[in-house]
Image: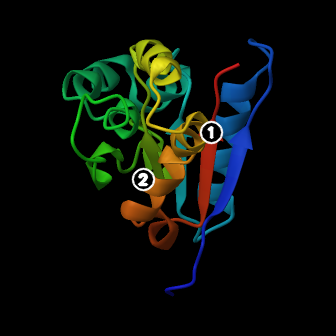
Amino acid sequence: MGDHMAKRISIINFKGGVGKTTLAFEFAAGLARYHSPSRVLLVDMDHQSSLSIVCLTAHEWQKIVKANDTVNEIFKPFIGQSNALPAQNIIEKQAIKHSYSHHYDKLDLVPASLQLDDIEIDLTASHHGNAIHSEWDKRTLICKWLEDAKADQEYDYIIFDCPP
């Protein structure tokens, strides 16, 4: 099992409002439910947080944001707001919090938060030493976290809902 690597799929479009979130959600739900026994991790990278709210319900999502258990935590060490990458605690297990959720118990989520845009601004402004290395480090933060949190061993698919 050591060399198992999850398939990583990013849903990207430069335009907003084209259905990225809906596609990410339906795709992940379909994999979790019909392509069993697939374990699926959804990562909400869009600060609008629509995916997180759809999965978790607004009430649950607000509690998670208050507890700082969102994707933001991955970027905080880079901009000096934290000393270490988060652990698996930012993964919300069995993310679909609705009555039909028993079909989706293999679907987990790293939620987004509305503050992500502030962190994006800080990230853009932050450089550590060499600018090119710095850019690379920023772009590989998510990959580094996935490695550190052992997500590749835990999941078969990791699906990213990206901002426009």
Element assignment for label 1 = helix
| Quarter of the figure with residue 79 | top left
- How far from the left and from the top, in percent, is residue 155? 52, 65
* Secondary structure state at the residue bearing disc 2: helix
Q: Tell us which disc is closer to us: 1 or 2.
A: 1
Mark 1 or mark 2: name the one nearer the start of the chain: 1
- In this view, the residue in front, 57 or 126, is 126
Q: Where is residue 11 in the image (x, y as percent from the top left)?
A: 73, 37
Query: In the shown orientation, is residue 3 left or right of residue 127?
Result: right
In the image, is residue 43 above or below residue 163?
below
Residue at 40%, 21% (x, y): give it.
113
As shown in the figure, which amino acid type bears the numbered disc 1?
Ile
**Which residue is at 38% across, 62% downward?**
148
Closer to the camera in the image, 83 or 114: 83
Q: Is residue 134 left or right of residue 150?
A: right
Q: Label 2: how many residues lie within 10 Å, few (<14), some (14-19) or many (20+)?
A: some
Report if the CB atoms under discs 1 and 2 are less than 8 Å apart: no
Tell me the residue that label 2 is attached to: 145
Q: Residues within 10 Å of mark 1 (few under 14, many from 20)?
A: few
Residue at (43% x, 35% y) in the render: 128
Q: Which mark is residue 162?
A: none
Q: Where is residue 29 in the image (x, y as percent from the top left)?
A: 61, 46
**Kind of residue at disc 2:** Trp
Check the image and name the residue furthest to the bottom. Answer: 1
**Label 1, on which residue?**
132
Whether residue 83 is visible = yes
Mark yes or no: residue 103 visible.
no
